[in-house]
Image (tube, grey):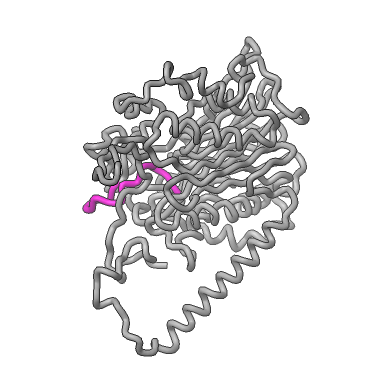
Amino acid sequence: MGSCLSTSDNPSRRRSPAPAPPSPRKKQRRSSSSSARMETEEEQRLRGIPGRTFLNGGTGAASLFTQQGKKGTNQDAMIVWENFCSRRDTVFCGVFDGHGPFGHMVSRRVRDSLPVKLSAQWEVNNGSEDCKTNSIRTVGSMNSEDSSSLYLEEESRGSIDFEETEKHPDTFMALKQSFLKAFKVMDKELRMHPNIDCFCSGTTAVTLVKQGQDLVIGNIGDSRAILGTRDQDDSLIAVQLTVDLKPNLPREAERIRRCKGRVFALHDEPEVARVWLPNNDSPGLAMARAFGDFCLKKFGLISVPDISYRHITERDEFIVLATDGVWDVLSNEEVVAIVASAPTRSYAARSLVESAVRSWRLKYPTSKIDDCAVVCLFLKSGGASINTTYSSAKMSGDEYLELTGAGSDKKQDLSSSSVLTLPRSSTVRLSEITQEDGEVEVVARVDTLLTLPRFIADTHIKR
């Protein structure tokens, strides 16, 4: 609850050492500790599920890596779940970028709960009698924010269809409904969660389910998924699979304004559109869709995923999911080249994160590096590395960055004027700090969330 209230500024809120009132507070503590024990048991159960990986490392088909930046606790999370829904040909992947005071808790909770909810919804949609009984309670709790319900049909119609066909396999239709319902239930759970304050904290989510040759992606926020595939010349190229759902997109801005929210950029960062409350210059959220962030849910922020489908072909090599700590400094093409040049598949995600960190330091040496999380899903079995005709992809990450200018003084001018330029994402800005102890002007990454609204305790979000 501490994200919106400050007790230090209000002496009347300081309590004397007198004994606390007996009954209600003790019951609340018992309830909280009981919830904490249940969560611990759930985490232990999830850790024991075969094929589920959420720590740095690799599997036969995927590579995962996350690294804390210089802004505090690592708020990024990731997961790969092979044999998803007990199907041998099915895998679930996701990355989650938390923000706000409790963003790290939100992202991890979504990482743990969303795949379970998606699995349950999918089984229900497929008519599995074994799972219907276990899932009926979850299905019945899908009362989400009114704004999400109003625009769910509209936003789902706006989903991207990369195959540009009017017909989809049954797998897509079942998964599409499952994604929509699972995201809705997940947001409801966060709203009612007894131990995580999601009023001014939230997370992005870019997730996918691959079953055989069918790929379905559900996305909210500004994390991104791309595909490494071959063109007609058999060269490896990058295809972006998701849209960064930011407030500057016309359809997102229109929805937010219709719900009385405001969208505008600050004078010192004109390229970064943010979402604001109607009568309060907060919180300034730099995305248009997210889990949590309930202070904005009545004003146009939604948790309805953008859903897309793609049929995997023989030309497709791998998929990369990553948080914006990677996309802020590396282009889609650079990411594909770095993953393709990794010495082994299991090292691919780590190689990409390390390249992103190096690029941050070279391009923006005085900036605070953001957290990074990467999942690389390889679409072809076997092989320690990718055999590619993409000449730059044959190089190591360092060599490729040098070739493209990130590691060369001749190619990349690191003067103060060039430091301000980040054409791909426009998420760094120049901020001045007091020049004490040798401190100089510093380029700081734009925060996802700027300010926290202050509310009286009684008007705080009702749980």
Question: Could you say which is closer to the camera, residue 134 or residue 373?
Answer: 373
Q: Is residue 95 left or right of residue 147?
A: right
Against 49, residue 230 (above or below) is above
Against 227, residue 194 (above or below) is below
Q: Is residue 146 left or right of residue 270?
A: right
Q: Answer with the quarter of the image where residue 255 lies.
A: top left
> Does residue 332 appear in the picture of this structure?
yes
- Farthest front residue in view: 437
Q: Is 78 within the magenta?
A: no
Against 224, residue 230 (above or below) is above
> Does residue 165 appear in the picture of this structure?
no
Which contiguous range is marked in magenta? 276-290
The percent coordinates of residue 104 (x first, y second) are 49, 54
The percent coordinates of residue 425 (x first, y second) are 40, 31
Question: Could you say which is closer to the camera, residue 444 or residue 38?
Answer: 444
Q: Is 284 within the magenta?
A: yes
Question: Could you say which is closer to the camera, residue 110 or residue 403?
Answer: 403
The percent coordinates of residue 403 (x first, y second) are 51, 17
The residue under the point 48% across, 59% down is 190
The residue under the point 52% across, 27% down is 240
The quadrant the N terminus occupies is: bottom left
The residue under the point 38% across, 47% down is 301
